[in-house]
Image (cartoon, rainbow, N blue to C red):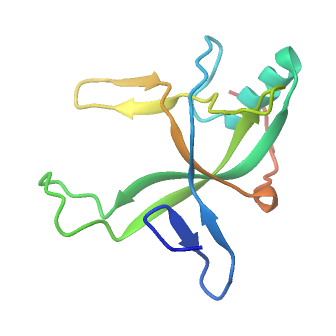
């Protein structure tokens, strides 16, 4: 597979992965930062399954001056879960925290995602 901006190779490994865009599925009871619980609730309501992997988030280093040069050196990977609905489509069901200078808010946006069955995580508490 040719390497491009959305292809990732682990150091010392031969596995390369392609990041995919997961479209948002907005729903009223979703909670920021609770991807596993959000997915489990939609499975309870509509069927489907949880898909584990990595959400590609911030690029870095962050620049306070607003310039994009030089280009970012890294991407942050966050352990994440998305919903595969009963028709087989992947859906982002967890809103992102959107922080602006005046007030934080939550919003549903597409997520760059790397599915990884080995990225399963353990939930120690279901508290809010």
Left or right of 14? Residue 74 is: left
Q: Quadrant of residue 15?
A: bottom right
| Picture coordinates of residue 17, whole percent (x, y) | 63, 65
| Picture coordinates of residue 92, whole percent (x, y) | 62, 32
Please tell me whether residue 110 is drawn above or below residue 3 in the rendered image. Answer: above
Please tell me whether residue 33 is drawn above or below residue 87 in the rendered image. Answer: below
Residue at 59% in and 60% down: 18
Residue found at the very far bottom of the displayed protein: 12
Quarter containing the N terminus: bottom right
Quarter containing the C terminus: top right
Residue at 67% in and 35% down: 35
Residue at 53% in and 66% down: 7
Please tell me whether residue 3 is drawn above or below residue 99 in the rendered image. Answer: below
Left or right of 63? Residue 56 is: right
* Front residue of 78 and 86: 86
| Picture coordinates of residue 27, whole percent (x, y) | 62, 14
| Picture coordinates of residue 99, whole percent (x, y) | 34, 33
């Amino acid at each position: 597979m040719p390497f491009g901006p959305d292809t990732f190779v682990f150091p010392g490994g031969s596995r390369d992965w392609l990041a995919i865009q997961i479209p948002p599925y907005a729903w009223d009871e979703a909670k920021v930062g609770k991807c596993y619980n959000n997915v489990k609730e939609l499975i309870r309501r509509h069927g489907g399954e949880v898909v584990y992997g990595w959400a590609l988030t911030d690029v870095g280093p962050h620049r306070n001056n607003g310039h994009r040069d030089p280009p970012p050196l890294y991407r942050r990977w966050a352990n994440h879960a998305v919903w595969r609905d009963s028709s087989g489509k992947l859906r982002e069901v967890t809103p992102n925290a959107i922080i602006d200078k005046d007030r934080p808010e939550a919003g549903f946006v597409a997520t760059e995602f790397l599915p990884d069955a080995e990225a399963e995580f353990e939930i120690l508490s279901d508290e809010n």
